[in-house]
Amino acid sequence: MQNSVTPTPTHCPYCALQCGMNLTPAADGTVEVSERTDFPVNRGALCGKGRSAPAVLRSSVRLTSPLVRSGGTLVPASWDEALDRITEGLSRTRTEHGPDACGVFGGGGLTNEKAYTLGKFARVVLGTSQIDYNGRFCMSSAAAAGMKAFGLDRGLPFPLADIPKSGCVILVGSNLAETMPPSLRFFNELRENGGTLIVVDPRRTKTAEHADLHLAPRPGTDLALALGLLHLIVAEGRVDEAYVAERTVGWADARAVAMAHWPEYVERITGVSVPDLREAVRLFCEPEHAMVLTARGPEQQSKGTDTVGAWINLCLATGRAGRPLSGYGCLTGQGNGQGGREHGQKADQLPGYRKLDDPAARRHVAEVWGIDPDTLPGPGRSAYELLDALGTDIRSLLLMGSNPVVSAPRAAHIEERIKSLDFLAVCDVVLSETAALADVVLPVTQWAEESGTTTNLEGRVLLRRQAITAPEGVRGDLEVLHDLADRLGVEKGFPTDPEEVFEELRRASAGGLADYSGITYRRLAEENGVFWPCPAAEASEDAAGTETAEATPLDLPGVHPGTPRLFLDRFATDDGRARFVAAAHRPIAEEPDEEYPVLLTTGRVVAQYQSGAQTRRVDELNAAAPGPFVELHPRLAERLGAAEGDPVAVVSRRGRAVAPARITTAIRPDTVFMPFHWPGEGRANTLTNPALDPTSRMPEFKACAVRLETVKP
Ligand SMILES: Nc1nc2c(c(=O)[nH]1)N[C@H]1C(S)=C(S)[C@@H](COP(=O)(O)OP(=O)(O)OC[C@H]3O[C@@H](n4cnc5c(=O)[nH]c(N)nc54)[C@H](O)[C@@H]3O)O[C@H]1N2
Ligand SMILES: Nc1nc2c(c(=O)[nH]1)N[C@H]1C(S)=C(S)[C@@H](COP(=O)(O)OP(=O)(O)OC[C@H]3O[C@@H](n4cnc5c(=O)[nH]c(N)nc54)[C@H](O)[C@@H]3O)O[C@H]1N2
Ligand code: SF4
Ligand SMILES: [Mo]
């Protein structure tokens, strides 16, 4: 902590870029953000959310006292009373219904230390298998596809700085000009260097405006699109046969599936013309290096895992994975979307990206935790399934770092499930829509008020440093978990110092896929982040077939430099080869019909973040993005009889939402788009379909059937 005028170098609380910034506390109690140019991801640039993040530190918008429900309303209470109430609530559920009736729900915004401790708390203190987190709604399909294809899942297998040196990048369903604005620079530099950018999005987004080629498929048809491109790659003789033979498995089956997807058939399914398909193949295949990057567009589908697999196939067939300046990557979303899924808050995982059903993994982690491996619960339900079981199988819930009343699919139903709980405790910095339903709300410290590590979309582990002192009345999440563990009879093993937690996490992750054992707070501070896997010196066998970093200040014998680039020698599978997937096109879970003839897709705008719990409390962001809207094509608007700004009702089988029309030719005429940042009447998730991907358990946020109605004033 620093109180002098020296700025503290730290990182933004929001998205997966984890932009570097400097914070300086001012005399009037506010905090000033200034440029931090030494961090290579953003080199000083910030988006409006990052610049205005200190506004959420003000006491006027945040919680500064615990709240407990009394006579139906939430009233301020002491920490002791609030913690006692949570202890009682959880203990009663456990006694009456067994440990699995206690649920825990986490978030990809939590630091590695918090995510790790939350997973340990669930399994060791509560003894429950019922823990999952909002990352399941985020990039879980890409994670599953990456594991299948490469044996390892890390957002990008290379630093962002490699992008300008590649020859072509296909961005599938990412609107990074709005969702990660400082990253646009890398794509503009790619084009300045003579490379090309292809954007695949049903809307001509701000990102698509920077593209050399924009393909606008019908939502939910990315799998067919990738198969059509692979078909042309084969038909035009562009397969790298030597690479396929040497470094992959499963080509014959993948090839057979692709050959059944003729360009004309794919055009009919996707709406992307055959000449555009051919042009995309030419741009992708001609340069020596090329990349495919996916984001939520193709991933948030009930076939997201196969869809991402089909895009990975394009890299494999053309020899563009595990080679310099080439490869497949997923643009993770939340500040710690990557690390949050590696250290044990996911239903089926233990720290270090270990599997909960692997006996060796259980033994290793149980030893670090000082428990008998037989007492470790098994895998639990996925996020939507967990929320759907609230009030029935799961009677009490501890929630940290998510606002599902706004962000879960089929949100009105989930809101009812939450209300039917016997007991709900929420730790948050603000009174979110979900916190407002709780029996106990605990006010916690925020990014600038505490230290901790996050892992950005490049797999770069970073140190966020405390820059200011938290206001009186709030406590850290780690302190909350420590105090609850203590009250629930586990006095040891829940330290409140993040560095102490990290030291334990290092040991727990040692030897796992996401090995952090060679990383220390000191290194993170000195090296501007370290890429995992980074085993401790004595175990520095190269797990992932990787190239190690350029010389660093700590490039000493016995110190592993970290792994900026993965798979250059071999993939992380047992035999070192990547796996093709062979999956044919299939429709979305809910195709439009006579009653619901239009497709709804959902996503983000630049000035709001997620459920909006934080950013809806910042005036300048609200001025830029004041509320929900329904984006629709002029032809659809005309048929409906709606003019710009008219309220439009969007109705699905799950419910009805109303928001003003925003009419634009930038969207397909068969599709409407709604951002999901707002609660209430305009809540997009009232409409969305919780159909789940069979592997990743990701809900289909990106496509469902709706009808539009005008609303009488
Ligand atoms: N401003 C802002 N930035 C954010 C966030 C935020 O809430 N606000 N959230 C952060 C998080 S957690 C995440 S996960 C990332 C998300 O980052 P992105 O994935 O870039 O965000 P989205 O807007 O959800 O989706 C991207 C695009 O997918 C398109 N799309 C819709 N359906 C389909 C489809 O079927 N196929 C294809 N190919 N595209 C489709 C949408 O039109 C949209 O433009 O952003 C991070 N950054
Ligand atoms: N329709 C539709 N729905 C979507 C999506 C979509 O594209 N379309 N995208 C999905 C995706 S990708 C995501 S990631 C989810 C995100 O949706 P949510 O999971 O709701 O994410 P946030 O709004 O970031 O919620 C984080 C909450 O935790 C609080 N918080 C922040 N930091 C901390 C902390 O350190 N400790 C504690 N205890 N609390 C903290 C914040 O104030 C906020 O209330 O939404 C999903 N929902
Ligand atoms: S792009 Fe992401 S990390 Fe960077 S300032 Fe904006 S929200 Fe923060
Ligand atoms: Mo996300």
Image: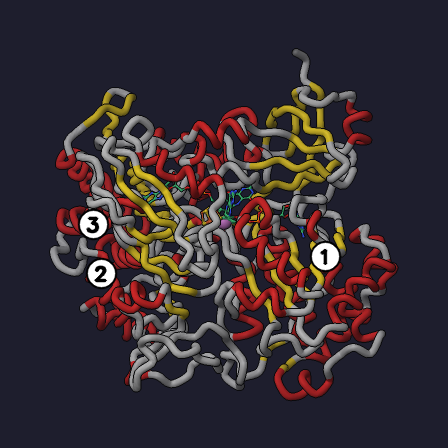
Of 354 and 41, nearer the camera is 41
Residue to which mark 1 is pinned:
586
The answer as to whether callout 3 falls within 8 Å of ligand 2 is: no
Image location (x, y in percent) of residue 628: 57, 29
**Which mark is in front, 1 or 2?**
2
Residue drawn at point x = 44 percent, y = 65 percent: 459
Residue 240 seen in the current view: yes
Q: Secondary structure at mark 2?
A: helix
Image location (x, y in percent) of residue 231: 80, 69
Which numbered disc covers residue 499? 2
Residue 381 seen in the current view: no
Image location (x, y in percent) of residue 26: 26, 37
Residue to which mark 3 is pinned:
1
Q: Residues within 10 Å of mark 1 (few under 14, many from 20)?
A: few
Of 694 and 606, nearer the camera is 606
Residue type at tag 3: Met
